[in-house]
Image (spheres, grey):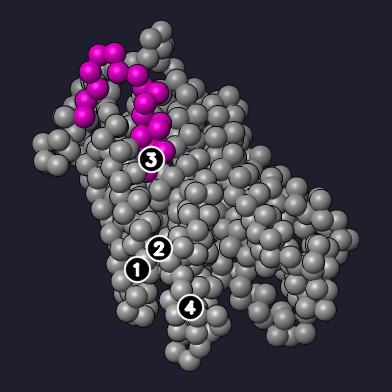
């Protein structure tokens, strides 16, 4: 594949190209890199690589393996932040191609690390190299989708980012089936599974890179009338350069907004299976109340349900934000989230499982919706010219949340249990802390206002050309 083919100028759409081919191209990328949400299926098998049926001498600890996912999220944010300007300059095809090589290469390196039983090599592969692929792949279609759908930016970005939330629905069963296929009495099957998935995802992501196109200069949908600036909804028709955007209070308020929303969601998402088993002992078929252990199948079903709502919330809330406005949509996330998080301890003590599940389903829909709505929020505030790069910088909030969320849930839980608190009650303090964090997010969102005149690119200058260089 030549560099010419990957060049932005060779991916400009010809007359008659349907813009509805671009969301599927983006989905090829996001459904692949969304496998990161299913990484937990590797955790237990990776902790028994030597013992096979149970952890043996020299096997890795679950707590050590858990850092692989956190490392991947950290490098996702870093790659998105530092690579955002490059992605906008070279266009979606070359950046999707790079993301495919990095993410798939990361799986191949991680597979080699598992085969050689070298945890640092797994950190390097999945955490660093794969994490960079996650970051570049995550932002590569965003600004392109916004340019193709200026009339429905929330719907467009929500459709693509929905794929990231749904990637686990493909990645988890695929990994489980492959590990079962490759497993023998002396081999866990993790290493060949990672190698196989790396090759599969490489091919799938290349399809997206081949399909994607950018609109010709000046293109607009038939009958589209550009929206006028709307102070009430904080929508501008002008542009702010990425370097200027990151100096504004609005950018950092939105950084806290995203951090709060993601920290609260990702903290409970990673512990959903354990949480429902410990808060509702004996509530499931085949549960063993003396072990405080629910049916693994039902607990896994709960996690799968949350994944569905995480995915569906991305398209639902992002689409609704096109009508409600981004600020109003985030206000709903936080106000409703505060009430739901604060009520979960009471629902657990009351043994009200249906309402508990309903609360978590709504929470995870808003967690996903926050990811899908933020690109359109940035486009409204800062314009579409540098929105991909600005979005990349903002995703450092996700990196921070990827560490803070699990740490809050895991260490507070361990501290409470160590001080005599029953496992069923060990999540109460965490839920109240999360609710308090959402209060901070709500306040920051309400403080966001239209940018001052000094932030916009002056018209009639070379600044627009500079922004693309």
Q: Residue furthest right?
A: 350
| Cα gap from disc 3 to disc 1, whole angstroms | 22 Å
Task: Report if the CB atoms under discs 4 and 1 are less than 8 Å apart.
Answer: no
Q: Secondary structure at mark 1?
A: helix
Q: Quadrant of residue 413?
A: bottom right
Q: Which residue is mark 2?
A: 193
Within-10-Å neighbours for mark 2: few <14, some 14–19, many 20+: many
Of the image marks 2 and 3, the number of the one nearer the N terminus: 3
Q: Secondary structure at mark 3?
A: helix
- The picture places residue 160, in percent across and down from the top left corner, at 44, 37
- The picture places residue 123, in percent across and down from the top left corner, at 36, 72
Is residue 20 inside the magenta stretch? Answer: yes
- Tag shown at residue 74: none
Q: Which residue is mark 1?
A: 111
Q: Which residue is mark 3?
A: 28
| Cα gap from disc 2 to disc 3, whole angstroms | 20 Å
């Amino acid at each position: 594949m030549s560099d010419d083919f990957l060049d932005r100028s060779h991916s400009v759409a010809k007359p008659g190209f349907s813009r509805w081919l671009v969301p599927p191209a983006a989905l090829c990328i996001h459904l692949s890199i969304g496998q990161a949400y299913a990484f937990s299926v590797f955790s237990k098998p990776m902790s028994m690589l030597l013992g096979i049926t149970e952890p043996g001498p020299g096997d890795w600890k679950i707590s050590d393996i858990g850092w692989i996912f956190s490392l991947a999220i950290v490098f996702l944010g870093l790659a998105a932040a530092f690579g955002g300007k490059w992605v906008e300059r070279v266009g979606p095809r070359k950046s999707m191609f790079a993301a495919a090589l990095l993410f798939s290469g990361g799986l191949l390196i991680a597979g080699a690390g598992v085969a050689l039983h070298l945890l640092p090599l797994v950190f390097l592969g999945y955490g660093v190299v794969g994490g960079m692929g996650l970051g570049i792949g995550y932002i590569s279609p965003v600004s392109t989708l916004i340019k193709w759908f200026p009339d429905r930016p929330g719907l467009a970005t929500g459709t693509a980012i929905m794929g990231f939330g749904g990637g686990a629905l493909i990645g988890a069963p695929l990994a489980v089936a492959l590990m079962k296929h490759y497993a023998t009495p002396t081999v866990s099957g993790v290493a060949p599974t990672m190698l196989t998935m790396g090759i599969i995802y490489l091919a799938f992501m290349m399809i997206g890179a081949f399909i994607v196109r950018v609109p010709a200069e000046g293109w607009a949908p038939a009958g589209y009338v550009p929206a006028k600036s709307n102070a009430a909804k904080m929508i501008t028709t002008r542009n702010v350069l990425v370097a200027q955007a990151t100096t504004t209070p609005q950018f950092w308020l939105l950084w806290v907004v995203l951090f709060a929303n993601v920290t609260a969601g990702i903290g409970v998402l990673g512990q959903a299976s354990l949480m429902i088993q410990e808060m509702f002992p004996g509530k499931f078929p085949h549960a063993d109340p003396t072990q405080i252990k629910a049916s693994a199948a039902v607990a896994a079903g709960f996690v799968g349900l949350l994944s569905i709502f995480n995915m569906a919330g991305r398209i639902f809330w992002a689409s609704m934000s096109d009508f409600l406005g981004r600020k109003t949509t985030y206000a709903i996330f936080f106000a409703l989230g505060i009430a739901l998080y604060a009520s979960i301890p009471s629902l657990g003590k009351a043994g009200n499982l249906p309402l508990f599940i309903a609360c978590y389903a709504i929470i995870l829909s808003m967690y996903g919706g926050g990811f899908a709505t933020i690109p359109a929020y940035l486009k409204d505030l800062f314009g579409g010219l540098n929105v991909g790069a600005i979005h990349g910088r903002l995703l450092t909030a996700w990196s921070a949340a990827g560490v803070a969320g699990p740490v809050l849930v895991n260490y507070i839980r361990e501290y409470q249990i160590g001080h005599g608190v029953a496992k069923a009650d060990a999540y109460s303090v965490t839920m109240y802390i999360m609710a308090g964090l959402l209060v901070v997010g709500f306040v920051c969102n309400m403080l966001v206002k239209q940018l001052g005149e000094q932030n916009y690119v002056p018209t009639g200058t070379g600044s627009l050309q500079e922004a693309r260089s």
